[in-house]
Amino acid sequence: MKTVAWAATVVLGITGGAAADEVDPSAVLATYADIAHAGYEDSLLAAKALDYAIDGLIDSATEESLLAAKASWLAARVPYQQTEAYRFGNAMVDDWEGRVNAWPLDEGLIDYVAPSYGTESDANALYTINVIANPEITVNGETVDASVIDPALLADTLHEAEEVEANVSIGYHAIEFLLWGQDLNGTEAGAGSRPASDYDTENCTNGNCDRRAEYLKAASTLLIADLEEMVANWAEGGAAREAVMADEATGLATILTGMGSLSYGELAGERMKLGLLLHDPEEEHDCFSDNTHNSHYFDAIGIRNVYTGHYRRIDGSIVSGPSIADMMAAKDPALNEELLQKLDATVDAMAVMKARAESIEAYDQMIGEGNEEGNAIVQAAIDALIAQTPFIERVVAAMDLGAIEIEGSDSLDDPNAVFQ
């Protein structure tokens, strides 16, 4: 991805003077860390519920137990997507993120695929290695014993094997594929339709039901472990919390870097505009489950959360405290109100897209070629994300936070490059 540098050079006037409406930057950073901890803790709780449902599927492979596991996966995405604004600017989160949310993935690495998927890729020698069907595989020219599918095999041997990013063997999307299977509908209606019998060892479909269950359980176990790690990182005394609290200006810049990069390069660009330009359902974020509309919506909610210092937990309780919005309300009320309006407009545009996906047509249909109305609704959400980014830049400038780097995207900055 490209990186866009935003420069900022105005004096931060929130210290000294002891004004009644003054906001302590350290309190703002504490709120930011508290919301991170709550969001990752909620993600962990939801992942444990998913793991319980996966156990139920493995123990008794029925359409009902498969539906329960799918419902748990969908629920688990809600808190996790709201944490994505923490990725950019927090190196510890960005380095970790690929273990839980990497996409897109070459699913032939994991399990059986339809003939339309093809048998090989010039970019990936492991394109159809299908570890579930093969107890012995070759990686980097060496024979690997895959007779037991366990977390070590998935995380240490297969994930990003041979330095190919599409070799995603773990995380939410590997689990998604194992629950839904491929979505072979293109831009027509329908998500993946894996049968529950793929896990029924007595009446097995598509072979290797025992190994498929091993893989699913290992991936779920890893997801829990990875989320436990990030919960600890944002707890009191945790490394991520300590890093963001170490320097006030750097910490505030981190918050705004995360907001701007997710808004512009990542969400508006790589996750939305790229797929719209190509009219390609393979470019949707939750492509097996047709849950992309929710992933995008909750990303937008997460961006607003960190600016306003307000997060609703999955149990309904609220985590809130002093925020950058409070700082800007004291320093530049007009700018603060403008950004709040932009953030709300983005959430509203995402809500329109979400409502359409839940009542008329899925996101992959919306981005289909020739679907003018669907395309326009997705473009409106992209436009809203783009429109809020300069106001984030202006907040950086108003607070004299130096230069921050906001992720860019060819799909926004150089669309012709997408087709080369």
Image (cartoon, rainbow, N blue to C red):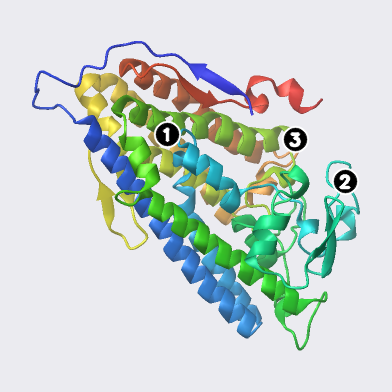
Q: Distance between the residues labelled 3 and 2?
A: 20 Å
Query: Does 309 sit above or below residue 315?
Result: above
Q: How far apart are marks 3 and 1 (CA)?
A: 26 Å
Q: What element carries label 2?
A: loop
Quadrant the N terminus occupies: top right
Please tell me which residue lies in front, 341 or 69.
69
Label 3 sits on residue:
278
Q: Do the residues labelled 3 and 2 touch (CB within 8 Å)?
A: no
Tag on residue 148?
none
The amino acid type of the residue labelled 1 equals Ala
The amino acid type of the residue labelled 2 equals Ser
Query: Does 330 sit above or below residue 113?
Result: above
Residue 301 spot, x, y in % from top left: 42, 43
Label 1 sits on residue:
345
Which sits earlier in the primary sequence, circle 3 or circle 1? 3
Residue 101 spot, x, y in % from top left: 58, 50
Residue 186 spot, x, y in % from top left: 77, 51
Residue 189 visible? The answer is no
Label 2 sits on residue:
121
